[in-house]
Amino acid sequence: MDFELNEEHRMIKETARRIARDVIAPRAKEADQTGEYPHDFFDAFKQAGLLGMAVPESMGGTGNGILPICLAIEEVAKYECGAGLILVLSGLPNKPLVLGGNAAQQQKWLPDVANGVTKSAFCLTEPDHGSDAANLETRAVRDGDDYILNGNKVYISGGTVADWLTVFARTGGPGAKGISAFVVDAHSPGVNIDRTDDKMGVRSVPTAHFSFSDVRVPAENLLGGVEGQGFNTAMLTLNSMRPTVGARGVGLAEGAASYALEWARERKAFGNAVIDFEAIQFMFADMAIQIEAARNLVYKAAWLVDQGKYTREYAHNLSIAKAYATEMANKVAFDALQVLGAQGYMKDHPLERHYRDARQLMIVEGSSQVQRVVISRAMIDRVLVYG
């Protein structure tokens, strides 16, 4: 068991740290206020070669793996959680092609997204089906050499800037076995962005509501060329990317704790620095305990994914990491804001933004409750055993 990062990992971490300090930190507040996609963040990641880490070299990426993505996300999320989401989106919409696409599909779409030439988005959630993805209603019907796609997808992160979409749609009967996956040109006739969301947090990466009205999708865009494999591909994709959401939580918590600590060193109360009060010191000790525990869970989960261990029998490890790290981020952001008192509540400081941003993490890519379903089932089925 080796807890040391290798040279490649350290280089990726340092590169992300430099981008975080030089590019992201100066613009973090503005990105939140405008709610406009930060193309400069994306371009910095592109120039540094950080967008292809989830795509194997044979498919046009750099193939570094999920742990290196988590390391980069952790660094940039210290300053702006949406920047971490941009790196998540370098993997989430593309993993279905890596896992379920055929060679022609992989070579057609993956090299350009890995090199930052194009952007993609992951379209699973619907107005009436979030966690209940097996019952999604968007439908694709075969018509000669095409499929005709109709339906709606909501809360699609990065959808406003996407060039193509990974869309999950029903091609067969009810339930999971009736779902297939398609690559859809985001600019095709009938693909519409009906609105974007006025979100509480993570405002720098807009979420879009798509409607598909008689969209013609070439049959060659059916992932793997086989109907009925979409749901399994979606679940494996979410499993494999789950540590990256936890990494956003770890980075956010580190940023919040660090900012609050430096403030507490300088702020005077009752003739002493705020950090000199034992009650405040214990708050920071608790933050550190939680951050370190979450980081170890996330790194282990990412390591498992990179070993190919993200199928159902390993899913509880990924759910534990995601649930703990994201809930930890909310607790640390809460306590860091509390250290600053009234100042923490004001937009003069980044902690109110960290607090808003953290709340998203317990919902996206499987809520905390869904993660607990996965974990408890593993215990009931004796996959996770302590006795």
Image (cartoon, helix red, strand yellow):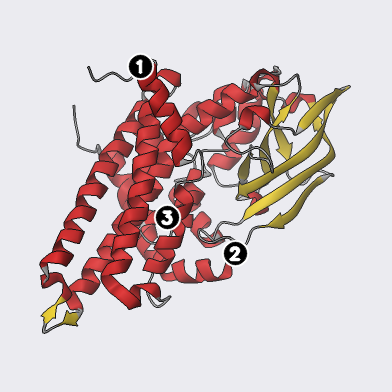
SS class, disc 1: loop
Q: Is residue 15 visible?
A: no
Residue 127 quadrant: top right
Say above or below: 308 vs 47: above
* Circle number at residue 17: none
Sequence-wise, the earlier of marks 3 and 1 is: 3
Q: Nearer the viewer, residue 309 or 217?
A: 309
Mark 2, mark 3: which one is toward the viewer? 3
> Which residue: 34% across, 15% down?
382
Q: Position of residue 75 (x, y in %)?
A: 34, 53
Q: Position of residue 268 (x, y in %)?
A: 17, 82
Which residue type does callout 3 highlight? Ala
Sequence-wise, the earlier of marks 2 and 3 is: 2
Q: Position of residue 180 (x, y in %)?
A: 69, 24
Point out the residue furthest to the bottom here.
Answer: 271
Mark 1, mark 2: which one is toward the viewer? 1
Residue 374 quadrant: top left
SS class, disc 2: loop
SS class, disc 3: helix
How many marks overall? Answer: 3
Say above or below: 304 vs 296: above
> Which residue: 64% across, 58% down?
197
Which residue type does callout 2 highlight? Glu
Left or right relative to 292: residue 67: right
* Circle number at residue 358: 3
Q: Quadrant of the N terminus?
A: top left
Q: Which residue is mark 2?
A: 36
Q: Is residue 223 visible?
A: yes
For the residues labelled 1 and 2, the Cα–Cα distance comes to 44 Å
Q: Which residue is mark 1?
A: 383
Q: Nearer the viewer, residue 279 or 184?
A: 279
